[in-house]
Image (tube, grey):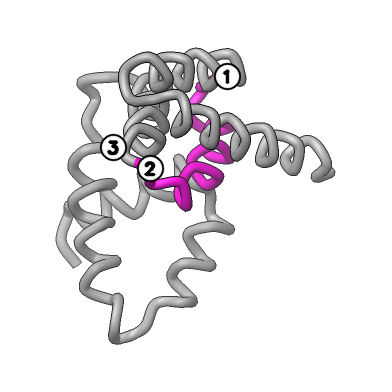
């Protein structure tokens, strides 16, 4: 394993939590193993591991990009990660307000719907 992979796995666990990463690792197969390594090294070991901006800012950027591009499947995961990144509910709301203006109201509306559902699930957990 490369240093970037190790660093990426550490950052991935820091942001997403051990339970999520353990589940993803357990579900890994020959079909997606190379892809998982690419994400771990590239996204987590390079982009997320950079100290150029804070985890809070990176979290907000990620949520904005996911919503703006219509990649809604990953929004709940990144909403749950706000517990670890320091992005508040207010930050998330402001992020999706920005998306509404610059990328479209329907995408921001759907992202807010997912955020509401995910925050409610998070509050229901002990």
The residue that mark 3 highlights is 48
Out of 98 and 17, give the one closest to the viewer: 98
Residue 30 sits in which quadrant? Answer: bottom left
Residue at x 39%, y 22% (from the top left corner): 99
Q: Crowding near pointer 1: few (<14 within 10 Å), some, many (20+)? A: some
Give me the residue at 38% from left, 14% from top.
Answer: 101
Most foreground residue, 2 or 93: 93
SS type, badge 2: loop
* Residue 113, disc: none
Task: Identify which residue is drawn at 52% across, 22% down.
Answer: 92
* Pair 3/2: label in front: 2
Which residue is more in the foreground, 112 or 47? 112
Mark 2 residue crowding within 10 angstroms, few (<14) / some (14–19) / many (20+): some
Query: Nearer the viewer's eye, disc 1 or disc 2?
Result: 2
Q: Residue furthest bottom?
A: 30
Mark 3 residue element: helix
For disc 1, the marked residue is 88
What is the x, y in percent for residue 72?
Answer: 46, 46
Quarter of the image where one finds residue 103: top left
Query: What residue is pinned by disc 2?
Result: 70
- Mark 2 or mark 3, which is nearer the start of the sequence? 3
- Type of secondary structure dominating the magenta stretch: helix
User: Start and end of the magenta stretch?
Assistant: 70-88
Q: Which element type, helix, strand or loop, lies under badge 1?
A: loop
Label 3 and label 2: CA atoms lie apart by 21 Å
């Amino acid at each position: 394993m490369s240093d970037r992979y190790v660093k990426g796995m550490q950052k991935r666990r820091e942001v997403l939590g051990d339970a999520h990463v353990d589940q993803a690792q357990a579900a890994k197969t020959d079909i997606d193993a190379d892809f998982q390594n690419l994400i771990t090294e590239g996204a987590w070991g390079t982009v997320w591991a950079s100290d150029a901006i804070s985890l809070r800012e990176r979290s907000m950027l990620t949520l904005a990009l996911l919503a703006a591009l219509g990649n809604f499947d990953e929004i709940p995961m990144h909403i749950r990660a706000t517990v670890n990144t320091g992005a508040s509910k207010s930050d998330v709301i402001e992020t999706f307000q920005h998306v509404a203006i610059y990328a479209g109201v329907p995408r921001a509306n759907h992202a807010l719907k997912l955020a509401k559902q995910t925050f409610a699930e998070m509050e229901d957990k002990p």
